[in-house]
């Protein structure tokens, strides 16, 4: 998959899997990613999913000048193939129940960072870190 998306092995891939809806907080994720890129340009953001906010998300990516570093993968059937590319997955959700994609990420061995609104029941053996909403990667 890294070859398909032309991602060198030395590039850190931050991922997110989910519908492009307000609750998933993609806008904040892009803000976080921009701060990361300012410190390390050898990073990509891979967004797997689609939804009613796609146009707004694309506009934000373009406005922030991140087109070459964000990969929009659309809806996918075989999520595990995409998870194999990701070095870490981030879930900055504003509200959430029990996200199955977070369970799937952990089952595939991808470290997870999630907002504190996600139920801690999703944490499989300490594979996910929960932090205060709004402070994700800001320190």
Image (tube, grey):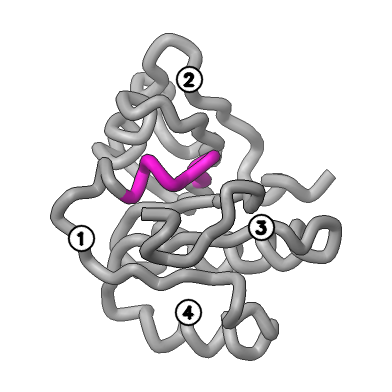
Give the alpha-carbon distance from disc 4 to disc 1, as whole Å: 18 Å
Give the class, few, some or many, for how many residues have Cα within 10 Å of label 1's Cα (few <14, many ≥20). Answer: few
Q: Residue at x 64, y 78 (%)?
A: 66
Residue beneath label 1, please? 76
**Mark 3 or mark 1, which is nearer the start of the sequence?**
3
Cα separation, mark 1 vs mark 3, equals 22 Å
Q: Are marks 3 and 4 in contact (CB under 8 Å)?
A: no
Task: Measure the alpha-carbon separation of dots 2 and 3.
Answer: 22 Å
Marked residue nearer the N-terminal end (4 or 1): 4
Q: Is residue 36 above or below residue 56?
A: above
Residue marked by disc 4: 57
Under circle 4, the secondary element is helix
Front tag of 4 and 1:
1
Question: Residue beneath label 3, please?
Answer: 43
Residues at discs 2 and 3 in contact (Cβ within 8 Å): no
Relative depth, front residue between 40 and 118: 40
- At x 41%, y 49%, the residue is 95
Position of 35 compared to 61: left or right?
A: right
Instruction: State which tag comes first along the sequence, 2 or 3.
Output: 3
Please state if 96 lies on the left or on the right of 44 as rendered. left
Tag 4: Cα neighbours inside 10 Å, few (<14), some, or many (≥20)?
some
Q: Is residue 113 above or below residue 32?
A: above
Disc 2 to disc 4, C-alpha distance: 28 Å
Question: Quick check: 96 above or below 40?
Answer: above
- Closer to us: mark 3 or mark 4? 3
**In the rendered structure, does residue 65 fall within the stretch colored magenta?**
no
Q: Is 51 on the left-hand or right-hand side of 11?
A: left
Nearest to viewer (mark 2 / mark 3): 3
Q: Which residue is at a point 52% across and 38% down the rendered structure image?
A: 114
Magenta region: which residues? 82-90
Q: Secondary structure at mark 3?
A: strand
């Amino acid at each position: 998959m890294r070859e398909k998306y032309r991602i060198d092995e030395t590039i850190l891939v931050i991922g997110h899997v989910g519908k492009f809806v307000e609750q998933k907080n993609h806008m904040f994720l892009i803000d976080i990613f921009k701060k990361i890129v300012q410190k390390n340009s050898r990073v990509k953001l891979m967004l797997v999913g689609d939804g009613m906010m796609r146009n707004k998300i694309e506009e934000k990516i373009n406005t922030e000048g991140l087109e070459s570093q964000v990969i929009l993968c659309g809806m996918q059937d075989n999520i595990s193939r995409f998870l194999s590319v990701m070095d870490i997955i981030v879930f900055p959700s504003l509200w959430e129940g029990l996200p199955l994609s977070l369970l799937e990420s952990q089952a595939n061995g991808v470290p997870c960072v999630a907002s504190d609104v996600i139920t801690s029941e999703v944490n499989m053996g300490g594979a996910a870190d929960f932090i205060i909403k709004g402070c994700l990667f800001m320190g």
